[in-house]
Amino acid sequence: MCGRYYIKHKMYEGLPAFMIAADSWRLIGDVHPSEQALILRRGRDRIESSFCNWGYPAKEQGGLVINARAETLLEKPMFCEDTLHRRCLIPASGFYEWDRRKQKAEICVPERDVIYFAGIYSLRSGTERFVIITRLAEGEMCRIHDRMPLIIPDGEIEGWFSEDYRALLKAEPPALDVKIENEQLSFL
């Protein structure tokens, strides 16, 4: 699951200049569900940036649906059409997750200023909104949570917007750097 992510100033330096509109503001800090955030999506002839609210309105229980499982995207009516026609990338510096003991973990990809979460977007309740696609956790992430954001490799950005996107739903996740707050350090 991904319930909060963060953006550092250096993230913008890692984005190609054409992906950021000249008049766009630069969000720095934590991004929470329901807030407006930067997404990248396929325009007519290039990838372009825009701002959308994080989360689709949940019909039955109220609140927001902020994530969608990669394994069932095309099976769920809420996500199928958007997966086929409205895929996006959410640039971030990293994300947070809380382990079973409620300790906050900060997770990033080492030596990358920008990572790209796979997402989908749609016009919902009169507002453009997005959700982050998640996958089963692997490696270091397993000790924190059973799910994690689907991170698209730098070299596959165009692939996410092409018909090849299905292969990326099953791509190996990158190595992650996990720092847990209040983690005890031992000195032997």
Image (cartoon, helix red, strand yellow):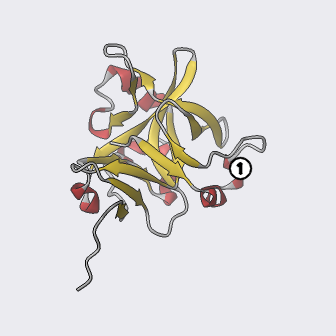
Q: Nearer the viewer, residue 139 or 46?
A: 139
Location of residue 43 by image quarter: top right
Above or below, comparing residue 76 to residue 23 in the picture: above
Location of residue 15 by image quarter: bottom right
Q: In the picture provided, is 79 more to the left or to the right than 30?
A: left
Residue 22 in the image: state x and y as whole percent: 78, 45
Q: Nearer the viewer, residue 168 or 94?
A: 94
Residue furthest right as drawn: 23
Q: Quadrant of the N terminus?
A: top left
Q: Quadrant of the C terminus?
A: bottom left
Residue drawn at 51 percent across, 42 percent down: 31
Q: In the picture provided, is 14 more to the left or to the right than 66?
A: right
Disc 1 target residue: 18
Residue drawn at 63 percent across, 57 percent down: 9
Above or below, comparing residue 11 to residue 69 in the picture: below
Determine the secondary structure under disc 1.
helix
Residue 148 in the image: state x and y as whole percent: 32, 48
Location of residue 164 by image quarter: top left
Residue drawn at 43 percent across, 51 percent down: 95
Residue 44 in the image: state x and y as whole percent: 66, 35
Residue drawn at 59 percent across, 57 percent down: 11
